[in-house]
Amino acid sequence: MTNKKNLKQKLKTSIEFSKNLFITGAITETSRKVEIEICKHIPIDRDVTVVEFGMGHGNITKAILDKISPNSNLYAFEVNGEFCDYVRKSIPDDRLTIINDGAENMINHLHLKIDCVISSIPFSFFSKEKGMGIIQDAYNFLPYGSYFSQVLYTKFNFKKFQIIFDDCEIIKFRSFPTEYIYHCQKTID
Ligand SMILES: C[S@@+](CC[C@H](N)C(=O)[O-])C[C@H]1O[C@@H](n2cnc3c(N)ncnc32)[C@H](O)[C@@H]1O
């Protein structure tokens, strides 16, 4: 994408995110550094099934698709129907299944083994019950050794992940706004 097109696209995303602030929890897309870091634990030595929570306009979605093998799959959850339509048009990829529903309903849609969860949903805007429910359901779906990686603008939700996951690491990016990535591993069978 050219710089001008890129800038126009970013501006469009910021406008859409701001219009839906209480659902998106953000006014801009996460940074390129975050797109790379959040995909760090996706296995690349085999075909995998990845689940994304909070697809937005698909910037992390694209980074995941760039990383996974040709026979892998990505299931992306997004509550905003317009964002789903946008990504359906802008990222035509047979490996991508878009689910226009909340992460809290994942058990109604996923009937297969998954290998990794990549998430940018705004936990700070969820009730404790809803947030913990999403983390616990994801933990139950994930196999031993796998990761749930989450990006947020705050470290305050880290504790919720530490309660459920066995091994958690937090990484701080001094961007504006500051971004935190939580890498949470299931190490117990
Ligand atoms: C902070 S934006 C992140 C968008 C994009 N992935 C990025 O990194 O820039 C969070 C996204 O999560 C979506 N979202 C909010 N609550 C959700 C939920 N319960 N399940 C799935 N998506 C949700 C919002 O509509 C929004 O698109």
Image (spheres, rainbow, N blue to C red):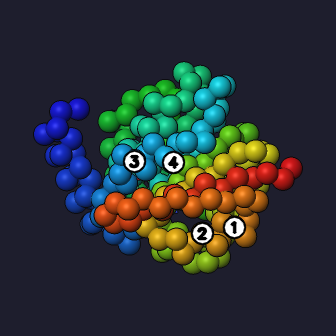
- Taking the spot 72% from the left edge, 39% from the top edge, the residue there is 112
Q: CA distance from mark 2 to mark 4?
A: 15 Å
Name above or below for residue 2 compared with residue 19. above
Labelled disc at residue 162: 1
Q: CA distance from mark 1 to mark 4?
A: 17 Å
Q: Is residue 60 left or right of residue 103?
A: left
Q: Which residue is mark 4?
A: 38
- Taking the spot 38% from the left edge, 72% from the top edge, the residue there is 22
Mark closer to the chain start, 1 or 4 = 4
- Taking the spot 76% from the left edge, 59% from the top edge, the residue there is 166
Mark closer to the chain start, 2 or 4 = 4
Q: Could you tell me which secondary element the residue under label 3 belongs to?
A: helix
Q: CA distance from mark 3 to mark 2?
A: 20 Å
- Circle 3: residue type: Lys
Across and down, in percent, residue 7 comes to 18, 46
Q: Which residue is mark 2?
A: 158
Q: Say which quadrant the N terminus sits in.
A: top left
Mark closer to the chain start, 3 or 2 = 3
Q: CA distance from mark 2 to mark 1?
A: 6 Å
Beta carbon of the mark 3 residue lies under 8 A of ligand 1: no
User: Farthest residue in the left direction?
Assistant: 4
Q: CA distance from mark 4 to mark 3?
A: 9 Å
Across and down, in percent, residue 118 comes to 55, 49
Q: Which residue is mark 3?
A: 33
- Circle 2: residue type: Phe
User: Farthest residue in the top direction?
Assistant: 70
> Label 4: how many residues lie within 10 Å, few (<14), some (14-19) or many (20+)?
many
Q: Could you tell me which secondary element the residue under label 4 belongs to?
A: helix
Q: Is residue 127 left or right of residue 112?
A: left
Query: Are the two marked residues, 2 and 1, in contact with CB atoms closer than 8 angstroms?
Result: yes
- Circle 1: residue type: Gln
